[in-house]
Image (tube, rainbow, N blue to C red):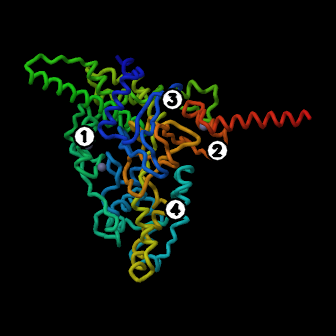
Amino acid sequence: MAAMLLETPSDAAMRRYYDKLASAGKGPGLRVDQIGGAFGKGLFADKVFDQDELVLREPKLVGAQHEHNKADALVCSFCFQYIGSMELQIGRRLLSKGDESAHDLKETGSLSGGEEGSDMDLTEEKEESENGHDGCGCDEKSHNRKAISTELVDSLLTGDLHLPYSDKFPLSPITSCPGGCAEDVFCSDMCADEAWRTYHSLLCAGPNSLCENKKALAQFKEHACDSNDIFLVAAQVIAGTILQARNLKNEILKNATAKGKEPRQQTHDILLEAWEPFAMGFKKLWWEAVALPDDVDPSQEDSFRDQFKELAIESLNYLKEAIYEEEYDPLFDLEVYGHIIGMFELNNLEIVVPSPVEDYFIYIDDLPKDDQSAHAGTVTRPFLDALGSEYATYCTGTGFFALQSCVNHSCRPNAKAFKREEDRDGAAVLLAIRPIRKGEEITISYIDENHDLEERQALLADYGFVCSCSRCIEDSSMKIFSSRALAGMLQQ
Ligand SMILES: [Zn+2]
Ligand SMILES: [Zn+2]
Ligand SMILES: [Zn+2]
């Protein structure tokens, strides 16, 4: 049965699924079609798109904020919108650096102690953080920081201190989890209910959780946080499929009772139906799909891959202890678990949500120079100093999307993933970078397409394919041509 979950769906099954999405209004002006070769399927324009026009905006099927990002951005666990208040966002970030800031350098920041004036000039710092902070880990983040008193941080957290102009950046108040856990918070009842219905009720640590072994659940989460937080997203797939299968089963029961018949319960069919959204994703085994890093000697490849497999085994064991149900046993198969994570490895989109904290400090910096702005600058300066370049850190996470995951790569793409001013959540957003004809395939570049042919091919090897887009074909024929020309010149 586990093998059935991993079978490539038939063309007819794919057609049914994507037609269902289209008729539910998902991805207007788009259609998913089969294409030959390694790609399997692709996303196609069913209408003309102008340059810069929105091609797709789609919420995730499953996804999570990165664990290491949680102190930097308090967001809705379901839609990734920033929540709470500006004061809370800034206070939490400062708190996470707590000891370091409060003890190393004492009380440099007080309301009266800041520099006069508000000439902060954030532009340079902003560029630096956009271009560089991912590449170099955390060191760059912490430079230029000045400490701030714990009292001041507390006053932000308690709401006693109101920052000037923070009401220009209103955030949704925090909605707590209906299960009563402290880990997941939401922007609205709608997000809280959707999360609860689609996966969280089985993965919640709170008193109303439907999970029967919360100790094992806690161990599962701890293991994921210590090793790879992608396991938390894999758990959403499994929990979500179980919950959906239960719903389908109840529906069948209800319909049968209404008709006065014995319900015909086909567990296999129900499970396959509930699994449908994840059946569609292109998959490979995680420990086989993951690219061998340059610093791993090829002779060590087997043990490198075994480490990933070991991690998956440990993780799955905890998850099984926490939420196993015999009826849905195939979902807890190691091959299935490995393929879910491999599917993420090959398809997931890095979720980025721009930070209102960054917008806020830029707003203060851009205020027309007068007494009021001088005051605002004086009040906010200590916080900005204490945050250093980190004031601009975004919310980051990873997500799997039904339609976006069908978009193939091209080194000469016609669309790009991009957040517009109004995109303030974790949805995948694709914009046309040139006019797109009806019937044309939508493509994005998975890599920095400014590289030359060889570098591009090397980067794309991580995705497990050799690109044969129009640009790669041109570039390689140019290469053959120029090497022939060179050979011809040498012969003369
Ligand atoms: Zn939300
Ligand atoms: Zn909860
Ligand atoms: Zn290419």
Q: Report the Cα–Cα distance between label 4 and label 1.
A: 37 Å
Instruction: Kindly tell me whether mark 1's CB lies below 8 Å from ligand 2.
Output: yes
Residue under label 1: 196
Residue under label 4: 126
Residue 442, how many percent across, how many down?
Answer: 48, 40
Residue under label 3: 39
Q: Which label's residue is closer to the chain start, 3 or 1?
A: 3
Q: Report the Cα–Cα distance between label 2 and label 3.
A: 22 Å
Q: Which residue sits furthest bottom?
A: 371
Q: Which label's residue is closer to the chain start, 4 or 2?
A: 4
Q: Nearer the viewer, mark 3 or mark 1?
A: 3
Q: Report the Cα–Cα distance between label 3 and label 1.
A: 34 Å
Q: Nearer the viewer, mark 1 or mark 2?
A: 2
On-image quarter of the N terminus = top left
Circle 3: element type: helix
Q: Nearer the viewer, mark 3 or mark 4?
A: 3
Residue under label 2: 451
Circle 1: element type: helix
Q: Nearer the viewer, residue 52 or 188?
A: 52
Residue name at image x 50 percent, y 75 percent:
119
On-image quarter of the C terminus = top right
Under mark 2, the amino acid is: His
